[in-house]
Amino acid sequence: MQLVRPLHEAEGGSRLAPNRGWPGGARLAVVVLMHLDHVPALPGSAPGLPPSSVAMRGPYPQIMDVHSTSQHEYGLRVGAFRVLDLLDELEIAPTVAIDAFSARHRTRLVERVAESGAEFAAHGLDGAGILHDGMGAQEQRAYLAESIDAVAEACGVRPTGWSGLDYAQSTTTLEDLAGLGIRWTADWPNDEAPNILATSRGDIVDIPVNIHLDDVFSHLKRGTPIGRWADDVTVSARRLLGEDAPRTRTLVLGLHPWLIGQPFRFAHLRETLRALRGMDGLWWARGTDVVAHLDGEAQHEEGDRR
């Protein structure tokens, strides 16, 4: 198997996206990125398991483990609706990364997400298999194409964003995504500002996830107490707002309703988002809003050079 170094890395790194400031003079763009995953009782011939999957907590996938898999169903049945109600209350339109299975089979949930004004992003086939370089090139492209097409068909709009399961990509994912018309991803936590990932098929905007603030990576994988996680989110926002930075930055907050939608954790999410909502200088945006703004900035920059 021959691995291909991502083009932007071979050229010395990604470049910052042109940006003179966020709308309304905001200093920090906040993107709430909610993940909707269906984890099958048995993964069958799934291409791989995510590192933060239920496999860490029990015998799954070797045998069926209802305690591990059905909590993800809880997220689709209960947690997601609870989180969406809170976002509506706070007038926050999220970006929702939804896998193909959930898009096809959770009709009421898809309708509820659409009612919230959310942007749909593609998110893989289901919660059991991730992209990796052990898959063939055609298999990877088919995985991506099906993921995107399923969201387009079920949600009524073709997604322009991609958030991989557990933010995973292979060495050729960016090339394939660009070829399929994807404009942005949140998978590369390489900065605090949007940056451009170059591919031979076109550029992709990276709106970098704050990986250590993602609820699964922080609370589940690293064992951060949920109250401490809530404090970390607000402290991070205050720091990013308070620094005299030469460029405008983003805070992408990854949420998984099967985890954060549990009542005892949800109380901390509510207080955290209320605290952020009370801060001055924030622009609450979806991934597509960030890209649209950056497109406008790039046009201004091109005009200045003429």
Image (spheres, rainbow, N blue to C red):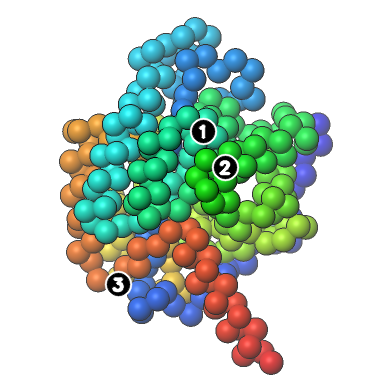
The circle drawn on residue 153 is 2
In 3D space, how far apart are the residues under numbered discs 2 and 3 (Cα atoms)? Answer: 37 Å
Seen at 69% across and 50% down, the residue is: 180
Of marks 1 and 2, which one's residue comes earlier in the chain? Answer: 1
| Secondary element type, mark 1 | helix
In 3D space, how far apart are the residues under numbered discs 1 and 2 (Cα atoms)? Answer: 8 Å
Looking at the image, which residue sits at the far right?
2
Displayed quadrant of residue 123? top right
The answer to whether residue 235 is visible is no
Instruction: Give x and y (percent) for residue 99.
Output: 52, 36
Residue bearing the label numbered 1: 104
- Residues under numbered marks 1 and 2 in contact, where contact means CB atoms less than 8 Å apart: yes
Could you classify mark 3 by the number of other residues whose Cα lies within 10 Å: few (under 14), some (14-19), or many (20 or more)? some
Displayed quadrant of residue 76? top left
| Secondary element type, mark 2 | helix
Foreground mark, 2 or 3, reads: 2
Which quadrant would the C terminus be assigned to in this image? bottom right
Could you classify mark 1 by the number of other residues whose Cα lies within 10 Å: few (under 14), some (14-19), or many (20 or more)? some
Which quadrant would the N terminus be assigned to in this image? top right
Amino acid carrying mark 3 in the image:
Gly
The image shows residue 110, relative to residue 72, as above or below, that is: below
The circle drawn on residue 281 is 3
